[in-house]
Image (spheres, grey):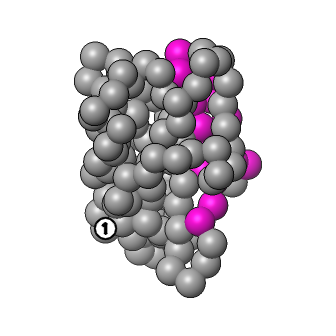
């Protein structure tokens, strides 16, 4: 599967963005999806994951209540709605995919995901 992320940009603290990740090449509904982020010079970190069915999600503690993940099977797209942005959210955001037989499982480790998008940069100014 190929993943193409978009939607990043420069935004003031308190603002919002919606990131998109379009999947192509395979059956989207077979994949659990996730977003990770990476600040230059630091390790990539988990942000949020969603199951194949979309019925299960898991958020990293620092983004709970501000980030919302969703998926649209008709568009082969997973979204990340980011509200109340903080300067600490500045990073390159990567979407990732993992084929799974489990419709309800979510995965939070990098090594769970063999497929990655190129990333989209989110910059939050104070």
Between 121 and 34, the residue placed more toward the observer is: 34
- Residue 23 showing in the rendered view: yes
Magenta includes 54? yes
Residue at 48% across, 39% down: 97
Query: Callout 1: few (<14), some (14-19), or many (20+) C-alpha neighbours within 10 Å?
Result: few
Quadrant of residue 75 within the rendered picture: top left
Q: Residue at x 53, y 74 (%)?
A: 39
Whether residue 77 sits left or right of residue 65 in the image: it is left
Residue 122 in the image: state x and y as whole percent: 39, 64
Position in image of residue 38 (x %, y %):
53, 68
The residue that appears at 63% across and 61% down in the rendered structure is 45
- Front position in the image: 8 or 112: 112
Say if 45 sits above or below 98 in the image.
Answer: below
Place residue 107 in its image quadrant: top right
Q: Is residue 48 magenta?
A: yes
Residue that appears at 36% across and 66% down:
121
Give the extent of the magenta segment.
44-61
User: In which quadrant is the N terminus drawn?
Assistant: top left
* SS for callout 1: strand
Q: Is residue 82 visible?
A: no
The image shows a total of numbered marks equal to 1
In the image, farthest residue toward the right? 61
From the image, tell me which residue sits under label 1. Answer: 10
- In this rendering, the answer to whether 50 lies above or below 5 is above
State left or right for residue 48 relative to residue 7. right
In the figure, 88 relative to 109: above or below?
below
| Looking at the image, residue 26 lies above or below residue 21 | above
């Amino acid at each position: 599967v190929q993943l193409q992320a978009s939607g990043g940009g420069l935004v003031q603290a308190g603002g919002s963005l919606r990131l998109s990740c379009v999947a192509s090449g395979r059956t989207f509904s077979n994949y659990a999806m996730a977003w990770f982020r990476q600040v230059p010079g630091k390790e990539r970190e988990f942000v949020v994951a969603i199951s194949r069915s979309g019925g299960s999600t898991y958020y990293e503690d620092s983004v709970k209540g501000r980030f919302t993940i969703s998926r649209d099977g008709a568009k082969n797209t997973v979204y990340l709605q980011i509200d109340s942005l903080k300067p600490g959210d500045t990073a390159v955001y990567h979407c990732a995919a993992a084929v799974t037989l489990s419709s309800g499982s979510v995965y939070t480790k990098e090594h769970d995901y063999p497929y990655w998008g190129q990333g989209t940069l989110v910059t939050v100014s104070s």
